């Protein structure tokens, strides 16, 4: 599904990714780990097509995520580490997602309920005014409702309480079949029951890649 | 197209709720109200009276404050979203960069143009209610000029927003452009340049490429072109070019300028790293 070949990304003189090559296939749940500045976020952003690589390439189902942005992003769900301060109301955000990604609003509500988040009562509230945990729950609900083949979570449980984390893991277990799950995390113990592969990055390179 | 309208619609809704929009609308609406309260329509100075005088005063103030309002409120449109990681999340959905960018441009254009336009409409309606004669030719000219001026500075703002990494730099650049263009209007630097005996064709060229100067000259072109308040360059332009041609230039040129800058901004947005 995801093929990365000799990917190099530099920011000025700083090499963020250096000739990174790897593949992520169906039914793989990967923990992407490494110290700050190791290149994890750059790798994820390259997969999403946000960065133009200096050399090498990223292919998602054989497609370049920059040139074939729409086709590629139809297959990817993404939850960032910190929910961004989106000023749209929840209903507007859901409308954006429904129209752009053809996600059923009812399905978002369903997963939000599963995450113990009542969005019906907050539809007119600005997204950025929700608590950190509520925002994260909503973004997780959206990522699951999108029914993507590739789900990328950047520290997804950072804002969640233990009960919400359990709900999140339960929902992921129910939805992991035939997908690539990519977790950017510093805490392996939180996702160890979900993952079957662990990649460790350092200084822009993959230094270990273990499958369980 | 559905995505384009959606982005425009959501940007419009988001802007209308923002505090800057309230201030922005209050400033232009308040100006009109202030003019009526101050009895501007009843006074007669240098041949202008009634609503004509009110609209002229409104447009002369607008020349100075509209560009900076548009620049500082719009310049953070994309760079601010980039700063706060909103762009990273919103663009994780299958929406094309073209739809996202131009949707934002359309939404923001409506937001910045409507308050200045409606302030004029309010003046016309209130003036008609008070029994004043409606200067339709001035109203239509100013509507066209405001439309063109809004598009010029909106295009410049989106251009800056597309390549600047932080909102602070974007704001600084906006102030610089505003001051720079303001300095190159007739009364200020151009008079100085004439004193320094610079080539008149260079002076005219500089004034003609400055959208603020074009706007200023066009705004007073319907009045007596002999007026000394116009300044030397404005007088020269109106003396050497027919009024109709100049009015057309003053509307078409800023429109094209805005579109060119907006298009360049889009090309940068498309080619650069998104976050």
Image (spheres, helix red, strand yellow):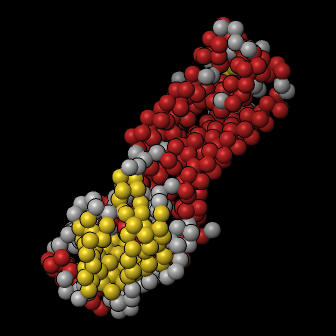
Q: Quadrant of residue B103?
A: bottom right
Along the viewing direction, whichever of B146 and A144 lies nearer the viewer = A144
Q: Is residue A166 visible?
A: yes
Give the answer, above or below, for where A82 lies relative to B105.
below
Residue A66 appears left or right of A34:
right
The residue sitting at 20% across, 69% down in the picture is A186
The residue sitting at 24% across, 60% down in the picture is A36
Q: Is residue B45 visible?
A: no
Q: The C terminus of chain B lies in which quarter of the figure?
A: bottom left
Q: The N terminus of chain B lies in which quarter of the figure?
A: bottom right
The residue sitting at 62% across, 11% down in the picture is B192
Q: Quadrant of residue B150?
A: top right
The residue sitting at 65% across, 32% down in the picture is B211
Residue A155 in picture, x, y percent from top left: 25, 70
Number of numbered discs on residues: 0
Along the viewing direction, whichever of A13 and B130 lies nearer the viewer = A13
Residue A7 appears left or right of B115:
left
Give the answer, above or below, for where A126 lies relative to B261.
below
Along the viewing direction, whichever of B26 and B67 lies nearer the viewer = B67
Residue B75 in picture, x, y percent from top left: 49, 44
């Amino acid at each position: 599904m995801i093929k990365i070949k000799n990917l190099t990304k530099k920011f000025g003189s700083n090499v963020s990714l250096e000739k990174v090559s790897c593949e992520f296939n169906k039914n793989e749940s990967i923990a992407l780990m490494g110290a700050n500045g190791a290149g994890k976020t750059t790798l994820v952003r390259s997969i999403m097509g946000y960065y133009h690589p200096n050399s090498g390439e990223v292919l998602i189902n054989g497609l370049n995520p920059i040139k074939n942005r729409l086709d590629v992003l139809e297959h990817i769900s993404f939850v960032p580490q910190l929910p961004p301060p989106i000023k749209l109301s929840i209903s507007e955000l859901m409308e954006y997602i429904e129209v752009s990604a053809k996600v059923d609003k009812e399905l978002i509500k369903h997963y939000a309920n599963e995450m113990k988040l009542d969005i019906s009562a907050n539809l007119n509230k600005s997204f950025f005014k929700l608590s950190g945990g509520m925002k994260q729950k909503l973004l997780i609900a959206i990522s699951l409702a999108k029914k993507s083949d590739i789900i990328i979570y950047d520290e997804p449980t950072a804002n969640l309480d233990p009960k919400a984390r359990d709900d999140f893991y339960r929902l992921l277990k129910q939805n992991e079949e035939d997908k690539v799950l990519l977790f950017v995390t510093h805490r392996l113990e939180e996702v160890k029951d979900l993952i079957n592969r662990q990649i460790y990055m350092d200084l822009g390179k993959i230094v270990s890649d273990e499958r369980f | 197209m559905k995505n384009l309208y959606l982005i425009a619609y959501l940007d419009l809704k988001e802007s209308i709720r923002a505090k800057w929009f309230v201030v922005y609308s209050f400033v232009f609406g308040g100006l009109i109200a202030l003019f009526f309260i101050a009895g501007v329509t009843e006074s007669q100075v240098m041949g202008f009276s009634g609503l004509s005088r009110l609209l002229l005063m409104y447009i002369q103030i607008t020349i100075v404050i509209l560009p900076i309002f548009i620049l500082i409120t719009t310049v953070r449109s994309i760079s601010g979203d980039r700063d706060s990681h909103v762009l990273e999340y919103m663009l994780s959905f299958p929406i094309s960069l073209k739809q996202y960018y131009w949707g934002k441009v359309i939404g923001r254009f409506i937001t910045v143009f409507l308050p200045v336009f409606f302030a004029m409409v309010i003046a016309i309606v209130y003036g008609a209610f008070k029994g004043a004669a409606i200067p339709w030719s001035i109203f239509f000219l100013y509507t066209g000029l405001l439309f063109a001026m809004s598009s010029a500075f909106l295009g410049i703002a989106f251009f800056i927003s597309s390549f600047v990494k932080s909102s602070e730099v974007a704001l600084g650049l906006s102030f610089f452009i505003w001051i720079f263009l303001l300095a190159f209007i007739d009364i200020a630097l151009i008079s100085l340049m004439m004193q320094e005996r610079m080539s008149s064709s260079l002076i005219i060229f500089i004034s003609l490429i400055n959208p603020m100067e074009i706007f200023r000259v066009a705004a007073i072109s319907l009045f007596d072109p002999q007026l000394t308040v116009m300044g030397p360059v404005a007088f020269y332009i109106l003396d050497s070019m027919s009024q109709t041609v100049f009015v057309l230039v003053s509307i078409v040129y800023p429109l094209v300028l805005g579109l060119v800058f907006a298009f360049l901004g889009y090309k940068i947005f498309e080619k650069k790293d998104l976050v």
